[in-house]
């Protein structure tokens, strides 16, 4: 535990916190998540930098965590990559059952919409 404040530890017990999203103002609770560890807003997918390790509530940063990407774990489960707007740390968080599907898909296709090369050169690149 960091500092003198007592912080809850959700590594081994469910988090039933209800909160208002700092980014979009959406009321967020554990219902509908499909998990016992709600860690981001289902409306805008944003989070808050609270943990150093999942559930420990030991981070002193407290910055907004923006969703920057999705990836697929070995078990085919999707997860969101969040980046802290203050310190830049990256965290991976499981998606929740009630997450905004349009935002999840927009994160998934973002690299295709913004390739690292001009699309008009795609044919030239495939011939290499």
Image (cartoon, rainbow, N blue to C red):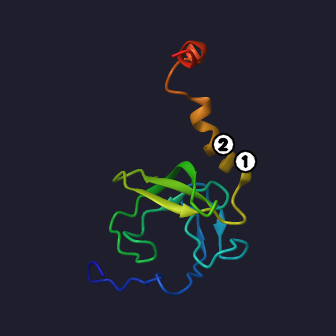
For the N terminus, give its image quadrant: bottom left
Asked if the residue at tag 2 contacts the one at tag 1, i.e. Cβ–Cβ closer than 8 Å, the answer is: yes
Residue 83's x, y, as percent? 44, 52
Q: Residue most toward the left? A: 3
Q: Position of residue 23 (x, y in %)?
A: 55, 55
Give the distance between the C-alpha atoms of the residues marked 1 and 2, in whole angstroms.
Answer: 6 Å
Depth check: give the residue in front, 100 or 86.
100
Q: Which residue is mark 1?
A: 102
**SS type, badge 1:** helix
Q: Residue at x 57, y 35 (%)?
A: 111
Vertical comparison of 29 with 80: above or below: below
Residue 50 located left or right of residue 68:
left
| Secondary structure state at the residue bearing disc 2 | helix
Q: Position of residue 40 (x, y in %)?
A: 57, 64
- Residue 124 image-quadrant placement: top right
At horizontal 27% and vertical 83% (from top left) the residue drawn is 4
* Residue 59, x across and y down, in percent: 35, 69
């Amino acid at each position: 535990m960091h500092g003198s404040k007592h912080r809850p530890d959700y590594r081994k017990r469910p988090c039933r916190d209800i909160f208002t999203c700092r980014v979009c103002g959406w009321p967020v609770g554990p219902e509908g998540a499909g998990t016992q560890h709600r860690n981001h807003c289902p409306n805008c997918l944003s989070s808050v930098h609270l943990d150093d390790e999942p559930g420990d509530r030991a981070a002193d940063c407290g910055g907004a965590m923006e969703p920057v990407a999705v990836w697929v774990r070995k078990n085919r489960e999707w997860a969101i990559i969040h980046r802290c707007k203050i310190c830049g740390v990256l965290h991976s968080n499981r998606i929740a059952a009630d997450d905004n599907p349009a935002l999840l898909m927009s994160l998934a296709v973002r690299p295709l919409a913004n390739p690292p090369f001009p699309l008009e050169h795609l044919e030239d690149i495939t011939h290499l």
